[in-house]
Image (spheres, rainbow, N blue to C red):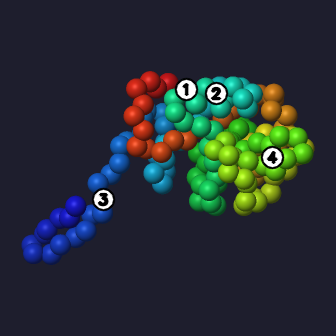
Amino acid sequence: RSLRILGARADLGPPAGPACPDVWVGYRGKCYYFSEDQGDWASSQNNCSALNASLAGIDNQQDMDFMVRHKSKSDHWIGLRRDPGQPWKWVNGTEFNNLFRIGGGGDCAYLNDQSGVSSLRCTSKRYWIWWHVRSWPITQWL
């Protein structure tokens, strides 16, 4: 894709991907949903799996900063958990790379109100953040 203006050519880059649905927020090729309801970690993940989404991961500091900016002051589940005595893993099975410190003594992680990550029992109630790559064919939305 390019645009020619009076003999000059400007590269506009690739065409924009599909827009995110209403109430979802687009960032770096993904759509994010910040919940208005609370649930335990497993039900939060199961509900978003029904939409071919998952609890959000944090690939880098930019992702973390974006989520902290857009969430309310409340705690929000993210897609990071561990089985007792095992390493932390993301919902896609990838082992956590220690990008950030995880406070608390629980087995499910959440973004806390101090812009960090803490952990609690997975049965605790929290808001949640879902994400999905923008190229999905979703027919059912919130």
* Residue 126 sits in quarter: top right
Q: Tell me the crowding category of disc 2: few under 14, some 14 to 19, or many 20 or more residues within 10 angstroms, Cα based.
A: some
Q: Position of residue 45 (x, y in %)?
A: 65, 32
In the image, taking residue 141 as reference, residue 115 lies left or right, namely: right
Mark 3 vs mark 2, foreground winner is: 2
Mark 2 vs mark 4, foreground winner is: 2
Q: Residue at x 73, y 59 (%)?
A: 97
Q: Position of residue 128 (x, y in %)?
A: 66, 35
Return the mark for residue 39: none
Q: CA distance from mark 2 to mark 4?
A: 21 Å
Q: CA distance from mark 4 to mark 3?
A: 38 Å
Q: Position of residue 46 (x, y in %)?
A: 64, 27
Q: Nearer the viewer, residue 67 or 130?
A: 130
Q: Which residue is mark 1?
A: 50
Q: Earlier in the sequence, mark 2 or mark 4?
A: 2
Amino acid type assigned to the residue bearing label 2 in the image: Asn
Q: Which residue is mark 3?
A: 14
Amino acid type assigned to the residue bearing label 1 in the image: Ala
Q: CA distance from mark 3 to mark 1?
A: 30 Å
In the image, taking residue 106 as reference, residue 24 lies left or right, namely: left
Mark 4 vs mark 1, foreground winner is: 1
Q: Position of residue 37 (x, y in %)?
A: 65, 25
Q: Which residue is mark 2?
A: 46
Mark 3 vs mark 1, foreground winner is: 1
Q: Residue at x 59, y 37 (%)?
A: 54
Q: Earlier in the sequence, mark 4 or mark 1?
A: 1
Q: Earlier in the sequence, mark 3 or mark 2?
A: 3
- Image quadrant holding the N terminus, namely bottom left
Amino acid type assigned to the residue bearing label 3 in the image: Pro
Secondary structure, mark 4, is strand
